[in-house]
Amino acid sequence: MDIDDTYIGDIATRLHIEKPTAFTKGKATVQHIQKLDDAGNEAKLERRYGDNGFTDGRTMRKLGSIPSVFLGKPEYKDIIDGDQKAMAKAAKRFFTDHPEFRTCNNNF
């Protein structure tokens, strides 16, 4: 059985530890890294060849794809918060700021 592990190399989490000195306090930071080319190219193809994000029966509409590295940013934290109104507002803000991940036009 062949395992495709190319996706594993596209996501990484780094832990940076700064040791304390006589003049500064030490600190630890976490950095999340994700390759965004694939998500952008997929959204671009869906925009080009899709039906403005609608499914065949027009029962659902895909606005786009949100890469997981953006979910940790404070301005988009409401996307995974659970409140539907806040989630919709944060998703609109994300797709306005990052139109390269949108699969439909502006009227969402």
Image: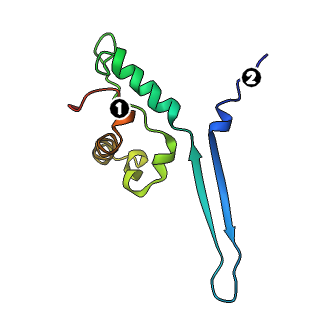
Residue 65 located left or right of residue 93: right
Q: Front-most of 6 and 76?
A: 6
Q: Earlier in the sequence, mark 2 or mark 1?
A: 2
Classify 10 as above or below 62: below
Badge 1 marks a residue whose secondary structure is loop
- Residue on which the image places disc 2: 3
Compared with 19, 54 (above or below) is above
- Left/right of residue 51 with respect to residue 81 in the rendered view: left
Question: Is 15 or 89 nearer to us in this picture?
Answer: 15
As drawn, the residue found furthest toward the top would be 56
Task: Say what secondary structure mark 2 lies in.
Answer: loop
Q: Position of residue 22 (x, y in %)?
A: 69, 89
**Residue 102 badge:** 1
**In the picture, residue 57 is in which quadrant?**
top left
Tell me which residue sits at (46%, 47%) in the image: 70
Q: Amino acid at mark 1?
A: Arg
Structural crowding at the residue carrying mark 1, measured as other residues with C-alpha within 10 Å and reported as few (<14), some (14–19) or many (≥20): many
Residue 64 image point, x, y percent: 38, 31
Horizontal and vertical percent position of residue 92: 29, 41
Residue 19 place in picture, x, y as percent: 71, 76
| Discs 2, 1 touching: Cβ within 8 Å | no
Please tell me how crowded label 2 is: few (under 14), some (14-19), or many (20+) other residues with Cα within 10 Å.
few
Residue at 23% in and 32% down: 106
